[in-house]
């Protein structure tokens, strides 16, 4: 039984079938990659897990209970954390604050009226956030605001914001897009390292180098349908996959 | 010293607050050259400083722009006068009751208004405030005494007051025999201003304050970070409503009369102006803005055609007439026009408000003196020597 079970999920946008009878089983502790051409519905599928979208039909079970109908903050508090495709950070706050906020949310829950203690007094939160910034290589910029950062740096900050929460299930939507090769490799290493801590991951990636260095299983999505699901070595030579990619207008 | 005007965070909060207290308590001295050292005006500086400080906790931190905060000011005033009527003229119970009742009103109005954001939120708060105004003005006349305004009467219950003999002077709020008018009234309001600014500083610096700032930059993202933003914004709304309630009560402590006009939309707009004029999101900005507006209101509204004629009497008759008729539009009753112009100038040229202007001047001055002003941030991020 998987930690995440997706059954017959359908999602339409007007006349567009963005997701069509999608099934997915993600094993605890594994890395499950979702690949497919642009517009295949990969981000839409993740949106159905985190409460941004509700599927028209189907079910999404996490750890034996449904995620559908939960509010975004409840899903996060349950341990499902997402790295966004376009980095969404708190651009007016410092990098350190950007990472401290999710750390506070993890420790204090969805709401705590902590109005009279100095942030600086919460040393363990600060240290945790600092440690995370070090891991993604942004520690030197901790007091800068994030608005002026490069896309790749924003991505690494996003990653830090998600990892600091020690997620149970981490959803990564193109975590290395916009990064240099060196940064991409560093991110792969980082993701492998937290894999050692037993974090289950779903990775959406166009970069096959990343996919094949991380994934335990791969689902291929095309036009809203899972066309193949298998281990990486079997995916490489699969005809359907070749066809989906070559047939895709974006390639 | 400079950091007093900025958002910067240092551990010297207490020192800054002490400094602020000294400046506030010494107002009768240093305001004298500006002709502003009389109690009436200084009371208003302190009271509207509290109002704007509270407003800034909502607007400055979360970005939610309430256009109805005067409702809580009015509720605070009415509650205070009723406390006087029922319990007696001691200001302490009046203040406590006003804070609680204004907080409850804010809870109700905020609960509904915060279901929307942006302009819809602003309009909802405006609508609620106008409703409160109309209720106070006509519907709830038995409670508010409508148009005439609510005041304390000699034969009110006033449970804990010693029975007054004869007519003995006007009914004033007092503690231990000291009447809360004139300088004592100012110092009473000033002490509360310092306390409330101290509280605001703590809130700005707290994890709660940080969450509110995150709401301002990206509320949706904050939800996906596991934070339920609704109670955070509601708490900020209630806290700022309580500040407004306190300010409303203080207005009645120095003059025990509450009228509905205190809740009108112009009053709600005024606190928005104060905050933006002074500098949104800074501690000192809204207080400066409040003082500036009350100061100019005082000066400009005092002018009338007679004083203008005196000022321009050196001009030939026809010119004098022309100047007087033009300038009279901007003074007296029309002083709001001057305020509007001032506001436009500030927003266009100094969007950060007066505090930003002071900061620029400060930085410029330091540079001229050859003292490179380094912010703490720059210091921390520069590499250690020998690296
Ligand atoms: N909110 C929405 N409303 C309408 N259509 C949408 C919405 N979100 C996505 N779509 C459409 O659904 C389809 C799937 O989009 P989705 O973003 O899931 O693709 P993707 O696989 O993540 O692509 P990419 O690799 O480019 O990120 C696209 O055709 C897209 O235009
Ligand atoms: Mg996508």
Image: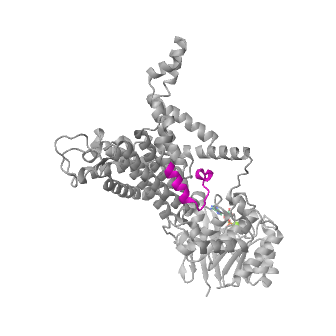
What residue span does the magenta drawing correspond to? B1-22
- Image location (x, y in percent) of residue B79: 31, 51
Q: Is residue A236 above or below residue B65?
A: below
- Image location (x, y in percent) of residue A170: 65, 76
The C terminus of chain B - image quarter: bottom right
Q: Which residue is depicted at the point 66% across and 43% down? A: B361
Q: Which residue is depicted at the point 51% across and 32% down? A: B337
Q: Main secondary structure of the magenta part?
A: helix
- The residue lying toward the viewer, choosing from A61 and B44, is B44
- The residue lying toward the viewer, choosing from A101 and A198, is A101
- Mark yes or no: residue A224 visible: no
Q: Residue furthest bottom?
A: A1
| Ligand 1 falls in quadrant | bottom right
Is residue A194 one of those drawn in magenta? no
The coloring applied to the image is: one colour
- The image quadrant of residue A16 is bottom right
- Residue A128 in the figure: left or right of residue B228: right
- Image location (x, y in percent) of residue B68: 44, 48
Q: Is residue B128 above or below residue B300?
A: below
Q: Which residue is depicted at the point 40% across and 59% down? A: B107
Q: Is residue B323 above or below residue A29?
A: above
- Image location (x, y in percent) of residue B215: 56, 60
- Mark yes or no: residue B32 visible: yes
Q: Which residue is depicted at the point 49% across and 42% down? A: B291
Q: Residue furthest top?
A: B317
- The residue lying toward the viewer, choosing from A207 and B382, is B382
- The image quadrant of residue A156 is bottom right
- Residue A163 in the figure: left or right of residue B180: right
């Amino acid at each position: 039984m998987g930690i995440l079970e997706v059954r017959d999920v359908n999602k339409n946008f007007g006349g567009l079938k963005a997701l069509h009878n999608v099934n997915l089983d993600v094993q605890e502790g594994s890395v499950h990659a979702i690949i497919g051409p642009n517009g295949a519905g990969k981000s839409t599928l993740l949106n159905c897990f985190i409460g941004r979208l509700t599927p028209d039909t189907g079910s999404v079970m996490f750890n034996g209970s449904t995620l559908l109908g939960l509010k975004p903050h409840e899903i996060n508090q349950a341990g499902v954390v997402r790295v966004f495709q376009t980095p969404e950070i708190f651009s007016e706050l410092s990098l350190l604050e950007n990472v401290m906020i999710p750390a506070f949310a993890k420790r204090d829950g969805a709401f705590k009226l902590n109005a009279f203690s100095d942030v600086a007094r919460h040393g363990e939160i600060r240290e945790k956030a600092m440690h995370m910034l070090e891991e993604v290589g942004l520690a030197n910029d901790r007091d800068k605001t994030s608005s002026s950062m490069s896309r790749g740096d924003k991505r690494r900050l996003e990653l830090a914001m998600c990892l600091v929460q020690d997620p149970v299930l981490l959803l990564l939507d193109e975590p290395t897009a916009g990064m240099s090769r060196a940064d991409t490799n560093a991110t792969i290493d980082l993701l492998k390292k937290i894999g050692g801590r037993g974090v289950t991951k779903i990775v959406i990636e166009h970069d096959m180098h990343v996919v094949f260095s991380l994934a335990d299983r791969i689902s291929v999505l095309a036009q809203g349908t899972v066309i193949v699901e298998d281990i990486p070595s079997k995916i490489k030579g699969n005809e359907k996959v070749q066809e989906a990619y070559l047939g895709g207008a974006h390639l | 010293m400079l950091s007093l005007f900025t958002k910067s965070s240092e551990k010297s909060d207490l020192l800054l607050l002490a400094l602020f207290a000294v400046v506030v308590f010494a107002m009768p001295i240093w305001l004298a050259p500006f002709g502003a050292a009389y109690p009436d005006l200084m009371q208003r500086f302190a009271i509207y400083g509290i109002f704007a400080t509270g407003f800034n906790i909502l607007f400055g931190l979360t970005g939610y722009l309430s256009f109805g905060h005067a409702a809580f000011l009015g509720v605070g005033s009415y509650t205070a006068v009723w406390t006087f009527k029922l319990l007696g003229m001691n200001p302490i119970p009046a203040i406590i009751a006003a804070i609680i009742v204004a907080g409850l009103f804010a809870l109700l109005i905020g609960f509904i208004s915060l279901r929307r954001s942006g302009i819809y939120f602003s309009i909802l708060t405006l609508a609620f405030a106008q409703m409160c105004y109309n209720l106070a003005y006509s519907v709830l006349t038995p409670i508010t005494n409508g148009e005439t305004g609510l005041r304390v009467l000699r034969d009110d219950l006033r449970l804990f007051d010693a029975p007054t003999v004869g007519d003995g002077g006007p009914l004033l709020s007092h503690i231990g025999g000291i009447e809360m008018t004139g300088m004592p009234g100012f110092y009473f309001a000033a002490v509360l201003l310092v306390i409330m600014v101290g509280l605001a500083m703590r809130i700005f610096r707290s994890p709660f304050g940080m969450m509110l700032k995150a709401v301002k930059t990206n509320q949706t993202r904050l939800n996906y970070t596991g934070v339920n933003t609704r109670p955070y914004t509601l708490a900020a709304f209630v806290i700022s409503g309580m500040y407004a309630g306190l300010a409303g009560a203080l207005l009645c402590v120095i003059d025990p009369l509450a009228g509905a006009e205190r809740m009108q939309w112009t009053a709600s707009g005024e606190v928005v102006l104060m905050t933006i004029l002074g500098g949104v999101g800074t501690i000192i900005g809204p207080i400066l803005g409040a003082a500036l507006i009350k100061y100019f209101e005082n000066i400009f509204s005092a002018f009338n055609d007679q004083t203008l004629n005196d000022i321009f009497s050196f001009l030939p008759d026809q010119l004098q007439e022309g100047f007087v008729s033009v300038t009279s539009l901007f003074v007296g009753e029309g002083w709001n026009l001057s305020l509007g112009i001032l506001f436009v100038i500030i927003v266009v040229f100094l969007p950060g408000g007066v505090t930003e202007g002071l900061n620029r001047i400060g930085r410029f001055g330091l540079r001229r003196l050859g003292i490179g002003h380094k912010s703490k941030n720059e210091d921390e991020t520069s590499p250690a020597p020998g690296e």
